[in-house]
Image (tube, rainbow, N blue to C red):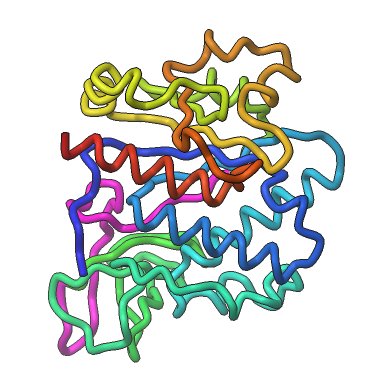
């Protein structure tokens, strides 16, 4: 199944402590798997992991989150070569499949087919593994073990392809994972988004700003949606670094008014938030 990509480049920011309250790696893996599914369901283009806490434990949590998200986003036929043996991935078997266009089923190559590939031989004509029985030749000098996106242009007598820029594809291809050493406030200021939305229990209800939010969302080309941690919301995270929420965010929204539980988990907030924002495109 192929769906059109968004007319905008949608980014989501997640805290490094997202899984810190879960002690076992198996449960961490399961939670990250749910997040990756939500990102793909709602055609998110980029997820940025930011630091909301300091110390070695925060760096460790950020590394695991980035690694698991990247692993799940990587096509199955490239995972073994890109990740090797890694104790952080020992429970990767429980990750649900994304079933996005960049994760095709095994089959025979077709002219025009687009694939993620890994450079296995570098030279004037590089050779890539694109998940076919035979390797694909690319008429470009590429870096060894570089991950690229290709289009099949010839099948016989030899498989050949050409490089493709995934961000220019007309279909949704998947999400990119980025980890930054910046705090949330500095991250917001460093990016080039034209619309910033935060989620908070103390935010305004969507219906109170519906018309303005819908207009801004439809006009936006690089929106950024912020999520807090299991222990702190976006306003609290920004306040710790001395950043005024109202000065860096266009909308601070309560996406689940009258919630029936004491706290809403980040993975639940993502589903609720992205569902509402997705509806704005249809209004």
> Residue 115, position in %: x, y?
30, 69
Residue at image position (31%, 83%) is 105
Task: Specify start and end residues of the magenta stretch as a single range.
Answer: 153-178
Q: Residue at x 57, y 70 (%)?
A: 82
Quarter of the image where the N terminus is located: bottom left
Residue 225 in which image quadrant? top left
Q: Pick the quarter of the image with the C terminus.
A: top left
Horizontal and vertical percent position of residue 73 = 47, 63
Viewer-nearest residue: 200 or 222:
200
What residue is at 27 percent from the left and 17 percent from the top? 212
Q: Answer above or below: position of 76 versus 195.
A: below
Q: Residue at x 25, y 41 (%)?
A: 279
Residue 77: say if magenta: no
Query: Along the horizontal axis of the image, is 151 left or right of 203?
Result: left
Q: Return the residue nearer the eye: 203 or 141.
A: 203
In the depicted structure, whether residue 160 falls above or below residue 101: below
Q: Nearer the viewer, residue 192 or 215?
A: 215
Residue 112, x across and y down, in percent:
14, 70
């Amino acid at each position: 199944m192929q769906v059109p990509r968004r007319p905008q480049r949608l980014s989501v920011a997640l805290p490094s402590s997202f899984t810190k309250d879960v002690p076992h790696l198996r449960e961490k893996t399961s939670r990250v798997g749910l997040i990756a599914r939500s990102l793909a369901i709602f055609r998110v283009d980029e997820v940025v992991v930011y630091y909301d806490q300091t110390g070695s434990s925060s760096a460790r949590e950020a590394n695991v989150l980035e690694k698991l998200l990247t692993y799940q986003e990587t096509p199955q036929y490239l995972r073994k070569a890109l990740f090797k043996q890694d104790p952080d991935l020992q429970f990767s078997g429980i990750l649900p499949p994304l079933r996005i266009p960049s994760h095709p089923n095994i089959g025979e190559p077709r002219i025009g087919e687009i694939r993620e590939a890994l450079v296995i031989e570098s030279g004037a004509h590089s050779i890539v593994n694109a998940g076919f029985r035979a390797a694909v030749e690319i008429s470009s000098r590429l870096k060894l073990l570089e991950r690229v996106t290709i289009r099949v242009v010839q099948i016989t007598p030899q498989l050949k392809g050409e490089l493709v820029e995934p961000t220019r594809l007309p279909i949704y291809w998947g999400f990119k994972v980025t980890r930054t050493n910046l705090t949330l406030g500095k991250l917001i200021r460093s990016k080039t988004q034209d619309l910033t939305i935060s989620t908070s229990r103390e935010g305004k209800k969507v219906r109170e700003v519906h018309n303005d939010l819908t207009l801004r969302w439809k006009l936006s080309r690089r929106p950024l949606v912020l999520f807090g941690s299991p222990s702190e919301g976006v306003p609290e995270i920004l306040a710790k670094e001395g950043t005024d929420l109202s000065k860096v965010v266009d909308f601070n929204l309560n996406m689940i008014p009258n919630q029936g539980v004491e706290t809403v988990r980040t993975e639940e907030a993502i589903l609720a938030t992205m569902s509402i924002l997705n509806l704005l495109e249809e209004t």
